Amino acid sequence: MQIIKFSNTLIPQSYRNEIALFLKEHLQQYGDSYEDISLALDYVSDTSGSKGGYLLVAQHDDVVTGAVVVNKTGMSGYIPENILVYIATHHDYRGKGIGKMLMEEVVNLCEGSIALHCEPDNPARKLYEKLGFTSKYLEMRLVK
């Protein structure tokens, strides 16, 4: 198992598409549209210095077994410096510690605090809590 890392660097288009499709499939009910996932990956690929973040991909041979996307917020203090936007493990590889491995790597890579959104019934919530994440706020949104 290897972890491939991208940070503030161009992600090759074919690989970016592969990862967006992977996340779309394996996030299941906790995911977003392919277009929204692509925007988060574009944010990681920004080299202007105004955006950025991390894409970590776990691979076994040529099979993507997991992926995590973190975007930098450009803020600190009142808003965490990083937001974990997406994390997914391939359904055939769940329960093998890949999500934990990716999360530990993200925690080590990120400078500053990390926020993430998690549905109350998401089984990954237990992993996040074991890693020290706490539920500080109830998120409310007005979608226009």
Image (cartoon, rainbow, N blue to C red):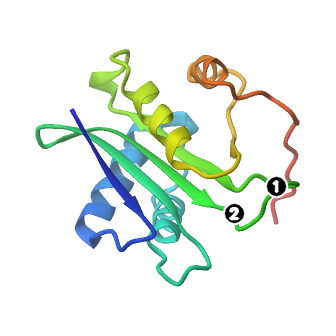
Q: Is residue 10 above or below residue 68?
A: below
Figure quadrant of the C terminus = bottom right
SS type, badge 1: loop
Q: Earlier in the sequence, mark 2 or mark 1?
A: 2
Query: What residue is shown with label 1?
Result: 79
Query: What residue is shown with label 2?
Result: 73
Residue 115 relative to residue 98: left or right: right
Residue 77 relative to residue 122: left or right: right
SS type, badge 2: loop
Where residue 36 sits, quadrant-wise, is: bottom right
Q: Tell which residue pokes out farthest to the left in this image.
A: 61
- Return the x and y of residue 31 as percentages of the image width and height: 54, 44
- Return the x and y of residue 45 as percentages of the image width and height: 44, 71
Q: Is residue 49 above or below residue 108?
A: below
Amino acid type assigned to the residue bearing label 2 in the image? Thr
Who is closer to the viewer here, 88 or 5? 5
Q: Is residue 92 above or below residue 50?
A: above
